Amino acid sequence: MTQTPVVVAVVHQNSGPGFVVYACQACAEHYPPQPDALTVRPRFQRATNEE
């Protein structure tokens, strides 16, 4: 347990509520940066829209 958790990821769900992943400050630097799911389009949409 930590007294100062930081957000390292936000998981979005289609079928229910998402959740937030927390880590201590020392461990948070080991998590890779997560893309924003609301701004990233799926690959198939990019391919069909960019033609």
Image (cartoon, rainbow, N blue to C red):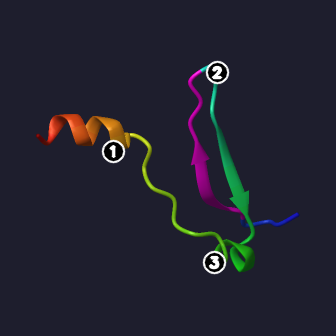
Residue at coordinates 56% horizontally, 24% vertically from top-left? 14
Q: What element carries label 1?
A: loop
The residue located at (71%, 57%) in the rendering is 22
Q: Residue 38 appears in which quarter of the rendering?
A: top left
State which region is magenta: 5-14
Residue type highlighted by circle 3: Glu
Q: Tell me the amino acid under the disc marked 1.
A: Thr
| Label annotation for residue 20 | none
Quarter of the C terminus within the rendering: top left
Q: Which amino acid does label 2 sit on?
A: Gly
Residue 33 left/right relative to 3: left
Rounded to the nearest whole Å, what is the CA distance between mark 1 and mark 2? 20 Å
Is residue 35 visible from the viewing direction of this image? Answer: yes
Q: Name the residue under label 3.
A: 29
Marks 3/1: CA–CA distance? 23 Å
For the N terminus, the image quarter is bottom right
The residue labelled by disc 1 is 39
Residue 41 shows up from this direction: no
- Picture coordinates of residue 16 (x, y %)? 64, 21
Secondary structure under badge 2? loop
Between residues 44 and 32, which one lies in front from this camera angle? 44
Q: How crowded is mark 1: few (under 14 residues within 10 Å), some or many (20 or more)?
A: few
Label 3, label 2: how many angstroms apart (C-alpha)?
Answer: 29 Å
Identified at 64% across, 70% down, the residue is 31
Main secondary structure type of the part rendered in magenta: strand
Which residue ends up furthest to the top in the rendered image? 15
Between 23 and 48, the one nearer to me in the picture: 48
Which of the 4 image quadrants contains residue 28?
bottom right
Question: Quick check: 1 above or below 18?
Answer: below
Give the residue at mark 2: 16
Compared across the picture, whether 16 is left or right of 44 comes to: right
